């Protein structure tokens, strides 16, 4: 009986000893999990904060990044010409000659064309009410108003447009004369900065490439350098080709608009040149703006301008563009449109300009890297 009693009560002390240890272990694991959850939440919040700070810095440096991007693309566009001249003279002399030519051309534009554009823009703003009055007095407007009587009031539409685009409101939209003057000063400063950066990139483009190559393992460095050279050459040829197409459009537009006596031919030709830098979409947009402004002269002038630009766009698409851009990477038309619209939405005109070379670079990478790897499997 004593043995049975001692045997029946023997596990009790051991159970009393084990139970507190298990409880302490559970409490310790729960507190450890709570500490880990706190650390993860703290690190996540710090990561979000760092991302917000970086995003704010990028936003603040947006103008600087735009300057750097424009200068780099100009340098890539001028590099093929520098490379050709380097075969006949030292590279430093070739860079100086090309850069000096760019500065002379830019100075000539600033001293000759820009004042005319400013004058004609001022005339457009100041004389806009007169253009509207003359438009209301034209016979075809009166006939159109009679035909649409009871449906749409053409006279009210014209008055609303005149009220919205009055000189005071245009200046108000632009921020006033002070803001316009500040914008001109900022544009000149930006031009000087871009020129300095372009000279630096031209002089150090090869050394910059060598530094980038050093980040790639030696086994893949030769292939990486080959693909990078192809990308930079394609981007350079694209920049030169697109500027050439824009110059052709601008010069032909000035000659044509002068012949048909369209209003403000220099300003409209400059618009055609500037928007033609954006492929496909830019030419269509510039042509539409020119045709609309030509309505102030007469419907016949606008009709002739519309016919001319329809013909020109066909000539550019099937004759000029293939001949000028034949050495650049061919980008499908759908990709051009999507890239131009997406780039314009993200970064404005510069974004639209940069989008096409980026698309060309992606195509080169896919053709030279992705496809060979997939075919080797």
Image (tube, rainbow, N blue to C red):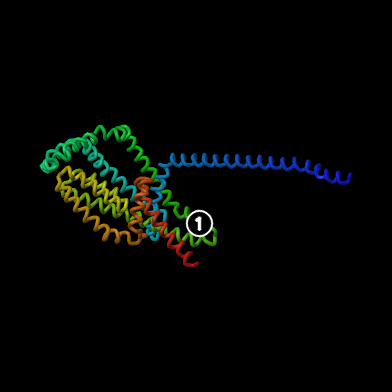
Could you tell me which residue is drawn at 24 percent across and 51 percent down? Answer: 251
Picture coordinates of residue 252 (x, y %)? 22, 52
Picture coordinates of residue 376 (x, y %)? 49, 67
User: How many labels were placed on the picture?
Assistant: 1
Q: Is residue 134 above or below residue 315?
A: above
Could you tell me which residue is drawn at 30 percent across and 35 percent down? Answer: 174
Mark 1 surroundings within 10 Å by alpha-carbon count, few (fewer than 14), some (14 through 19), many (20 or more)? some
**Relative depth, front residue between 193 and 66:** 66
Give the SS element for disc 1. helix
Could you tell me which residue is drawn at 59 percent across and 42 percent down? Answer: 40
| Location of residue 367 (image quadrant) | bottom left
Residue annotated with mark 1: 213
Looking at the image, residue 288 sits to the left or right of residue 213; the answer is left
Picture coordinates of residue 30 (x, y %)? 66, 41
Q: Is residue 332 above or below residue 58?
A: below
**Relative depth, front residue between 143 and 63:** 143
**Relative depth, front residue between 144 and 354:** 144
Picture coordinates of residue 131 (x, y %)? 17, 38
Q: Is residue 314 visible?
A: yes
Q: Can residue 100 be seen in this view?
A: no
Q: Is residue 206 above or below residue 185?
A: below
Find the residue positioned furthest to the right. Answer: 2
């Amino acid at each position: 009986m004593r043995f049975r009693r001692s045997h029946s009560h023997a596990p009790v002390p051991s159970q009393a000893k084990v139970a507190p240890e298990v409880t302490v272990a559970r409490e310790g694991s729960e507190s450890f999990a709570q500490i880990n959850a706190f650390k993860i939440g703290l690190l996540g919040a710090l990561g979000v904060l760092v991302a917000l700070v970086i995003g704010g810095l990028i936003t603040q440096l947006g103008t600087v990044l735009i300057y750097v991007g424009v200068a780099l693309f100009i340098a890539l566009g001028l590099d093929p010409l520098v490379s050709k001249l380097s075969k006949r003279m030292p590279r430093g002399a070739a860079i100086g000659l090309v850069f000096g030519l760019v500065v002379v051309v830019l100075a000539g534009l600033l001293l000759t064309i820009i004042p005319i554009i400013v004058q004609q823009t001022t005339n457009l703003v100041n004389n806009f009410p007169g253009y509207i009055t003359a438009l209301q007095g034209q016979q075809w407007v009166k006939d159109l108003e009679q035909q649409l009587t009871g449906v749409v009031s053409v006279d009210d539409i014209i008055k609303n447009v005149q009220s919205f685009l009055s000189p005071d409101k245009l200046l108000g939209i632009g921020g006033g004369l002070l803001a316009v003057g500040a914008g001109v000063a900022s544009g000149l400063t930006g031009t000087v900065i871009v020129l300095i950066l372009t000279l630096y990139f031209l002089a150090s483009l090869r050394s910059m490439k060598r530094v980038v190559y050093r980040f790639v393992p030696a086994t893949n460095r030769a292939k990486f350098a080959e693909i990078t050279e192809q990308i930079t050459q394609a981007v350079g040829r694209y920049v030169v080709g697109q500027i050439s197409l824009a110059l052709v459009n601008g010069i032909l537009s000035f000659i044509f608009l002068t012949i048909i006596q369209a209003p403000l031919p220099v300003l409209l030709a400059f618009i055609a040149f500037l928007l033609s830098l954006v492929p496909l979409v830019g030419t269509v947009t510039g042509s539409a703006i020119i045709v609309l402004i030509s309505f102030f002269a007469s419907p016949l002038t606008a009709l002739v301008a519309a016919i001319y630009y329809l013909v020109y766009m066909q000539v550019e698409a099937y004759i000029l563009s293939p001949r000028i851009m034949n050495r650049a990477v061919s980008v499908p038309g759908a990709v051009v449109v999507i890239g131009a619209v997406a780039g314009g939405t993200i970064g404005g005109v510069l974004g639209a300009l940069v989008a096409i070379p980026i698309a060309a670079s992606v195509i080169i990478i896919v053709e030279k890297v992705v496809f060979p790897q997939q075919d080797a499997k």
